[in-house]
Image (cartoon, grey):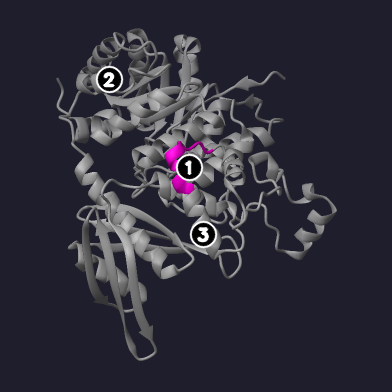
């Protein structure tokens, strides 16, 4: 049976970044975009340019650098959004506009306050307007799976007649189930003959844990494109995970006669890079890329794997880039070895960034006998994740012990300014967080605190992830060090820097319709 190729539309940099606290700097987004391009992603949704200056600049930089993948920008049915998307992507070799408007009854009534007729008029007007700028236009009826079937057909027909080249069916709130979604896709194919001339895409959320299953059901029923994110990150419970979808059709090609352009050997690299950039730690039991995915503890499993790995492994680790070959780095490793390690994981740094990364590597190698791969990802993340004039931990001192009230003194720098203060708390970490709050004059609420070991051995680095609530929003921070207290302080400051950066950079553009 001839395999049908499915286009992969990756929205890690747009929908994925909407995970609470997962915002990335422009350099981080650019590095992730380059990784997605090397992975073989067909279309990269780079952002929502009209929403902020940072989003605009990130899309602009990605458009200049990425040449093999189509660059996509999101826009509402608002002319100002379309104009902003065009300006951000004007240097893109291949560009596409992703236009959307909600269509379900609950969205029409409570969010838009629009009638069916008004929505159809808006779709036609704005797609026709966008055709002046874009040859490729994807249209999404938001909350499609909760939209009346007859009205959804009318919406799709209007979009195609107005010039849409891709129709995307979003399961916006993760409400549908595979059998239901399969029938919906089949009904669209039956009732809209013109759909065979363009791409039919799906965008599934994971609120019921069915995003991958629904996406597989959709392509089996006629969809030609899937929208995914690396590690399945995204709004609420996330999106269809790129690595899970791709490996499902790879392993079960007997039942799923499809193929993609994805280089599966680079899936693990992409996953680990994103984890380091966002600080969103991959669960140990996450399929394909989780730490436990290829571990076997039960005696009967171990015995079987020793005899033949196929007894309990349906995927070869090296197929997803988790081979056993490993270039170990240490204090005697030079620039060439370090550069080879980056090349192994398709990480491309500028000369300035490489110089800084290598310097950090040398300092870490002086502390550790061996520098593992995850250490390298953390180093790269720290180089790419710097925020202009951000707070930096210069030094700290902690006093604690039995019957001794924990206290911490921190010295923090921001530009040429220094901040120093001593704080107390319920423990050394709480004390250092309180000292930071007082030193820089900020009020935060710690929503989440996670310690994650990187590598093995007593000299392994500790990675700390925090989520702070500052005002009404949440900001994730990540810090790493062989000293857990230092890693905690770095993570805390990283989250505060994200907050300050968002205040300075988020110059929201007027979103009113023009």
Asked whether residue 275 is in view, the answer is: no
At 29% across and 77% down in the image, what residue appears?
425
Rendered image: mark on residue 87: 2
The image position of residue 319, as x and y in percent, is 68, 39
Give the prevailing secondary structure in the magenta stretch.
helix
Tell which tag, 3 or 2, sits nearer the viewer.
3
Give the image location of residue 220, x and y in percent.
Answer: 58, 26
Tell me the distance, in whole angstroms, between the alpha carbons under discs 3 and 2.
42 Å
Give the magenta range: 347-357
**Which element is circle 3 on?**
helix
**Residue at the image point whose x is 48% and y is 23% from the top:** 69
Q: Quick check: 108 above or below 437?
A: above
First-in-chain label (1 vs 2):
2
Name the residue carrying label 3. 364
Above-or-below relation of 509 to 428: above
Given this view, does label 1 or label 2 mark the residue nearer the observer? 1
Q: Is residue 44 visible?
A: yes
């Amino acid at each position: 049976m001839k395999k049908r190729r499915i286009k992969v539309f990756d929205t890690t940099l747009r929908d994925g970044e909407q995970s609470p606290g997962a915002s990335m700097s422009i350099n981080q987004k650019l590095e992730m975009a380059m990784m997605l391009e090397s992975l073989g992603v067909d279309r990269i949704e780079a952002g929502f340019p009209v929403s902020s200056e940072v989003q605009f600049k990130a899309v602009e930089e990605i458009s200049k650098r990425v040449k093999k993948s189509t660059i996509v920008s999101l826009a509402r049915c608002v002319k100002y959004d379309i104009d902003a998307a065009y300006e951000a992507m004007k240097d893109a070799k291949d560009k596409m506009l992703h236009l959307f408007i909600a269509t379900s009854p609950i969205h029409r009534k409570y969010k838009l306050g629009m009638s069916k007729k008004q929505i159809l008029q808006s779709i036609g007007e704005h797609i026709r307007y966008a055709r002046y700028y874009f040859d490729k236009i994807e249209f999404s009826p938001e909350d499609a799976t909760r939209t009346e079937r007859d009205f959804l057909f009318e919406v799709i027909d209007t979009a195609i007649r107005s010039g849409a080249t891709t129709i995307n069916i979003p399961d916006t709130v993760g409400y549908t189930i595979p059998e239901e979604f399969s029938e919906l896709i089949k009904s669209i194919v039956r009732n809209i003959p013109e759909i065979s001339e363009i791409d039919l895409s799906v965008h599934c959320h994971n609120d019921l844990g069915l995003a991958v299953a629904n996406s597989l059901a959709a392509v089996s029923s006629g969809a030609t494109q899937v929208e995914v994110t690396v590690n399945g990150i995204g709004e609420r419970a996330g999106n269809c995970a790129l690595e899970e979808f791709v490996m499902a059709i790879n392993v079960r090609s007997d039942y799923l006669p499809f193929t993609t352009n994805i280089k599966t050997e680079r899936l693990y690299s992409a996953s680990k890079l994103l984890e380091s950039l966002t600080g969103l730690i991959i669960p140990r039991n996450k399929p394909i890329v989780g730490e436990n995915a290829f571990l076997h503890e039960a005696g009967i499993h171990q015995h079987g794997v020793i005899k033949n790995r196929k007894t309990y492994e349906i995927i070869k680790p090296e197929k997803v880039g988790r081979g056993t070959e490993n270039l170990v780095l240490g204090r005697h490793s030079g620039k060439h070895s370090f550069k080879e390690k980056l090349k192994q994981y398709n990480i491309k740094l500028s000369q300035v960034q490489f110089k800084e990364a290598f310097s950090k590597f040398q300092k870490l190698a002086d502390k550790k006998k061996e520098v593992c791969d995850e250490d390298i990802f953390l180093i790269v993340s720290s180089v790419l994740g710097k925020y202009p004039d951000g707070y930096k931990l210069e030094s700290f001192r902690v006093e604690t012990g039995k019957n001794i009230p924990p206290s911490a003194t921190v010295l923090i720098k921001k530009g040429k300014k220094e901040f120093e203060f001593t704080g107390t708390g319920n423990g050394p970490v709480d004390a250092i967080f309180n000292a930071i709050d007082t030193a820089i004059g900020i009020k935060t609420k710690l929503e989440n605190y996670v310690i994650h070991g990187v590598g093995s051995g007593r000299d392994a680095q500790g990675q700390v992830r925090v989520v702070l609530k500052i005002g009404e929003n949440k900001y994730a921070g990540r810090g790493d060090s062989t000293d857990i207290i230092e890693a905690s302080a770095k993570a805390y400051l990283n989250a505060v820097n994200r907050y300050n950066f968002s205040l300075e950079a988020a110059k929201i553009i007027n979103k009113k319709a023009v």
